[in-house]
Image: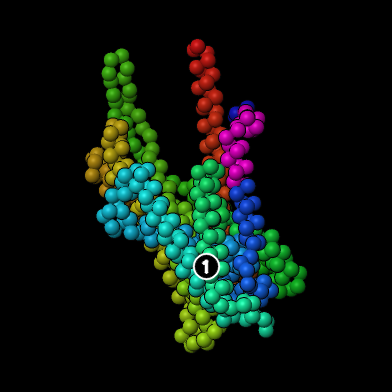
Amino acid sequence: MAAAKGTSVGSLGKLTELRQRIFFVIGALIVYRLGSFIPVPGVNPDAMANLIGQSGGLLDMFNMFSGGSLGRFSVFALGVVPYISASIVVQMMGSVIPSLQALRKEGQSGQRQLTMYTRIGTVGLSAFQAFGIAVALMKQSSGGMPVVYMPGFGFILSSVVGLTAGSMFLMWLGEQMTERGIGNGISLLIFAGIVAGLPGAVTHTLSMSSNGELSTIKLVMVVALILAVTAFVVFMERAQRRITVNYARRSGGQRSYMNQTSHLPLKINMSGVIPPIFANSILMFPAMAATWGNASHQSRWLQDLVQLLTPGEPLYDIIYAVLVIVFAFFYTAIVFNSQDTADNLKRSGALIPGIRPGRSTADYIDSVMTRLTGVGALYLVLVCLVPTFMQNAWHVPFYFGGTSLLIVVVVVMDFTAQVQAHLVSHQYEGLLKKANLRRG
């Protein structure tokens, strides 16, 4: 076992493709971080930073997901949220519109068409959101300073063009990271934005402890809870329900195969971090628009809406939990088809003990997957909301929220798993080459 590990580590330098993929991901993340400091012209940076700091709540969360780009009003201020929102719309429409359902079944060609629709939707949503933000910012002031130096059509045009171009570039960068790098590019961009703020959050928490704002006991409890949630996430992400599968005996010529027993592994959380990301993207912009509209009009109903849609408020938590559960079932239904799984088992001569092949097998797998998805959805809600309750009670920085912690842990696990898969693939390729050389 030790020799195998040594071989893997020793051969890492020879893995040209894996090394190139890792370097590409690192380079793309560097480009992303550099771009987050390129500002849109016409905005007072000090007033913008004060505005974000005073607003708190959802704006802090949006600023976190964008890697601090919103606080600097950079060209990446919208982040990948428009792309995620467009993906939600296209996927939901693909489940109800027959023409889009047909595209989903056409393989790569249909997927390319759906990707094109997602890109078009990203452009539209980015332009719409950029226009709304630009109009809202022209009415804002912070610390006696206007946020926008010269309000008017010129600022709106530059904001729409700059923010839309930034979102489209991030969409393209995420797709390139997925194709030429390792892991899901969009998740890695969100991961980079969250991690970029962690040092500041840790420093702020330690300063709170040194100033007496956060007692030592609470600080220890915060650290313990973060470690416990991390361990729980790792455990649940690796948890599987293994359905026993028997392969019937086959005989032909001089070869015969005895009955074999295997397992069909089903993850508890098949949807990963997609449901929390989707739920956040839906709740983010309406509440943000209400926050900025509230500052200029002082409408009573807008004040109530802003208050109700603040993380930690009962209504927000209820809506968030419902959205996470809905998206968990929805996304699992997209990525896992019980009928296709049953058909594959039937073609390979496999059956589940006590279950007839075909439709009965599909129904059984579907019932098991439904129960697993229910447990997985509740796990996502628990992980995302419990640290948020802690944050509201103890005033811990938002970066220690459950959603951010879940994304960081799951993305790291996915990245590590894909690196290990590349290493194993390289080992198998090396063994096959040696076998061919010996035969030759």
| The furthest residue to the top | 440
Kind of residue at badge 1: Val
The mark total stands at 1
Q: Please tell me whether residue 147 belongs to the stretch shown in magenta.
A: no
* Other residues around mark 1 within 10 Å, as few (<14) / some (14–19) / many (≥20): many
Residue 150 occupies quadrant: bottom right
Residue at the spot of label 1: 160
**Residue at (51, 80) in percent of width and height:** 293
Q: Is residue 229 left or right of residue 113?
A: right
Q: Secondary structure at mark 1?
A: helix
Q: Is residue 327 left or right of residue 339?
A: right
Can residue 386 be seen from the camera position used here?
no
Q: Please tell me whether residue 12 belongs to the stretch shown in magenta.
A: yes
Residue nearest the viewer, comparing 344 with 94? 94
Q: Please tell me whether residue 69 is drawn above or below residue 48 in the rendered image.
A: above
**Residue at (30, 37) in percent of width and height:** 345
Q: Is residue 440 left or right of residue 148?
A: left
Q: Please tell me whether residue 405 is drawn above or below residue 339 in the rendered image.
A: below
Please state, as top left, top right, bottom left or bottom right, where the N terminus lies in the image: top right
The stretch in magenta equals: 6-26
Residue 47 image offset from top left, x and y in percent:
66, 76
**Residue at (55, 43) in percent of width and height:** 181
Q: Please tell me whether residue 125 is drawn above or below residue 212 in the rendered image.
A: above
Q: Please tell me whether residue 259 is drawn above or below residue 120 in the rendered image.
A: above
| The furthest residue to the front | 154
Residue 73 occupies quadrant: bottom right
Could you tell me what secondary structure mostly forms the magenta stretch?
helix
Residue nearest the viewer, comparing 32 with 327? 32
| The furthest residue to the right | 210
Residue 98 image offset from top left, x and y in percent:
26, 55
Residue nearest the viewer, comparing 161 with 231? 161
Residue 80 image offset from top left, x and y in percent:
51, 59
